[in-house]
Image (cartoon, grey):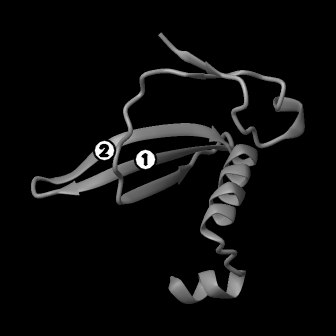
Amino acid sequence: MPKILENHPQPTSHRSRIKALVGSAPTLFCDSMSVHVRSDGNVLIRWFVGLPEGQVEQCKIMTNKEHIKKIIEALCKVADHYPTKEEVKKTR
């Protein structure tokens, strides 16, 4: 049975009134990912873990580019890392 979190943090103010339902989804360890942009503007992110047998897909999500931007902003904030375009170009 999902649990309802009254004060679950939400990315935007209009969502702060929405209760979050937390089910029994497992917590998975992932150490790599792949990102695929579809022609319809949606983005597929696949998360993997490396095992002796090879890469095993742990989970995947599909969302649109606007939601991806919010996810990236949240991850940058947590990591306190805000890469510039020049830094990204150097790592490729």
- Which mark identifies residue 46? 1
Q: Residue at x 63, y 62 (%)?
A: 78
Which residue extends farthest top?
1
Amino acid, disc 2: Glu
Of the two numbered discs 2 and 1 on the same chain, state the one appearing first in sequence: 1
Inspect the image, locate mark 1, and give the three-letter code of the amino acid beneath it.
Answer: Arg
Q: Give how far across and how far down residue 31 sits, in percent.
A: 35, 59
User: In this image, 34 relative to 48: left or right?
Assistant: right
Q: Is residue 37 left or right of residue 84?
A: left
How far from the left and from the top, in percent, is residue 36? 52, 51
Q: Which quarter of the picture shows residue 43? A: top right
Marks 2/1 in contact by CB < 8 Å: the verdict is yes
In the image, 39 versus 48, the foreground residue is 48
Secondary structure state at the residue bearing disc 2: strand
Q: What residue is at 78 percent from the left and 23 percent from the top?
A: 18
Q: Is residue 92 above or below residue 16?
A: below
Reply above or below: 46 against 3.
below
In the image, residue 85 lies at what x, y percent?
A: 70, 81
- 81 with respect to 54 (left or right): right
**Mark drawn on residue 57:** 2
Position in image of residue 7 (x %, y %): 73, 31
Of residues 60 and 15, the one nearer the viewer is: 15
- Mark 2 Cα shell of 10 Å, populated few (<14), some (14-19), many (≥20): some
Q: Secondary structure at mark 1?
A: strand
For the residues labelled 2 and 1, the Cα–Cα distance comes to 7 Å
Residue plotted at (57% across, 89% down): 90
The residue that appears at 67% across and 78% down in the rendered structure is 83
Residue 61 to residue 46: above or below = above
